[in-house]
Amino acid sequence: MRKFSPRLDNIGTEDAFSVMIKANKFEREELTPHGKKLIRLQIGEPAFNTPKHINKAAIKAIKDNQTHYTAPPGIREVRTALAAQSSKMTGVDFDTEDIIVHSGAKPSAFYTINAVVDPGDETIVFDPAWPIYASVTNYLGGTTKFIPLKEELGFQPDIEEVKAAITDRTVLMVVNTPCNPTGGVFSDETLAALAKVAVDNDLWVLSDEIYDHIVFEGEHRSILNHPGMEDRTILLNGASKTYAMTGYRMGWSATKNKHMGYVIERIQTNDTSCPPSMNQLALKEAVSSKKTPAAVEEMRLEYLKRRDLIHGLVNDIPGLSANLPKGTFYLFANAKPLCEKLNCNSAELADKIMREAHVLVLHGTSFGPHGEGFIRFSYVSSEEDIREGARRIKEWAEKLMA
Ligand SMILES: Cc1ncc(COP(=O)(O)O)c(C=O)c1O
């Protein structure tokens, strides 16, 4: 029998994508014949179009025949623009050479984890979390140590639990703030304490700040801003969320650690060679055009409106309650009373909500074991869809909890 690598037994997936296949089939077979549709509140993708001036830059790049390979870490002027943007957002002085542009932000996580995790090594991941950190760690033969993000602490970790989880095999800590899926934002005290843990234990830190422009209270804070972090941190960022550019697949790593920058570039050379040239030029326009801040702010204010709307509506559903998200476009709702009533877990609950209330949400355990008892709503959808989705779940839950 021709072999597949046993490594593949440990690679995970992203339910946000896989659940769509199941939902499409259900909709096609069970709802469409009756003229009905699912309300989709699961997707982690801005519903806005990419701002026009960014699309124009991509079209211009093609017209100018910018359609060739670029240097593996990206076009120099694009990297310079990203260095300026990353410096502004984190307080660290990044240079052009500190930036490696990727085809999406996802490769930053994949390359970084590949660079540091060997079989038997451990990664600290705050749970619930975007599933890729654990998936890649486990794929490489490492172990993911999940530290719970506590609802009662506003989805912050308990620092004593972080310290207790560290062993001599711990190599990496992943910090994601603002956080998918909780909508929580780590406080400066939490970031300072995590930075100290990283320094005391000489850990690498992957700081995923892809939602840095979607915060609703105060300014974005980065762990990079704390002492001892510059040389050990890889900043992950991207264009998908801030500029509604998911399909462009544009992201970047920023690191002051020269050796890490070299390693990430080397892995990328073996993977995609370089990111698409015309998309890099669109990304440069996104981060440097004077037209961008207004477009980004317009989207943020829309998310803010929808956050308040969905927060009110979800808290009005029997059996559901949710903290007010401080960032991102997700609301992580405690559904434990509904799970108890139905004697089911959150995956079964999300499935029932799809089949019986005709609304698509993600179950909390898509994001790790501590997501049990929760469901994630995304509020990128139109106000109309948010209202209709909440109305359907409320009607369904009222009957159930009566
Ligand atoms: C926390 C987090 N990090 C990184 C990414 C990757 O984004 P992309 O590869 O679209 O740039 C996502 C996308 O959902 C995310 O939620």
Image (spheres, rainbow, N blue to C red):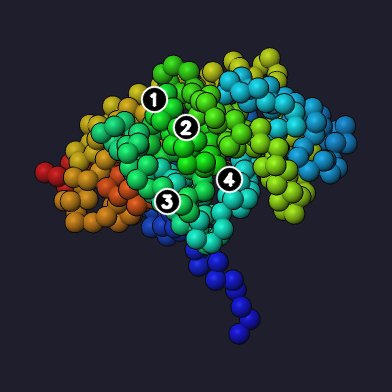
Instruction: Identify the amino acid type marked 3.
Output: Thr
Observer able to see residue 359: no
Image quadrant in which the C terminus is located: top left
The answer to the question of whether label 1 and label 3 lie on touching residues, with beta carbons closer than 8 A, is no
Marks 3 and 2: which is nearer the front? Answer: 3
- The CA distance from mark 1 to mark 3 is 23 Å
Looking at marks 4 and 2 on the same chain, the residue that comes earlier in the sequence is marked by 4
The answer to the question of whether label 3 and label 2 lie on touching residues, with beta carbons closer than 8 A, is no
Residue 195's disc is: 2
- The CA distance from mark 4 to mark 1 is 25 Å
**In the image, 234: left or right of 73?**
left
Marks 4 and 1: which is nearer the front? Answer: 1
- The CA distance from mark 4 to mark 2 is 19 Å
Instruction: Identify the amino acid type marked 1.
Output: Glu
Marks 4 and 2: which is nearer the front? Answer: 2
At mark 3, the secondary structure is loop
Image quadrant in which the N terminus is located: bottom right
- CB at disc 3 and ligand 1 closer than 8 Å: no
The answer to the question of whether label 4 and label 2 lie on touching residues, with beta carbons closer than 8 A, is no
Looking at marks 4 and 3 on the same chain, the residue that comes earlier in the sequence is marked by 4
Q: Which image quadrant is residue 96 in?
A: top right
Residue where numbered disc 1 is placed: 189
Looking at marks 3 and 2 on the same chain, the residue that comes earlier in the sequence is marked by 3
Q: Position of residue 79 (x, y in %)?
A: 74, 30
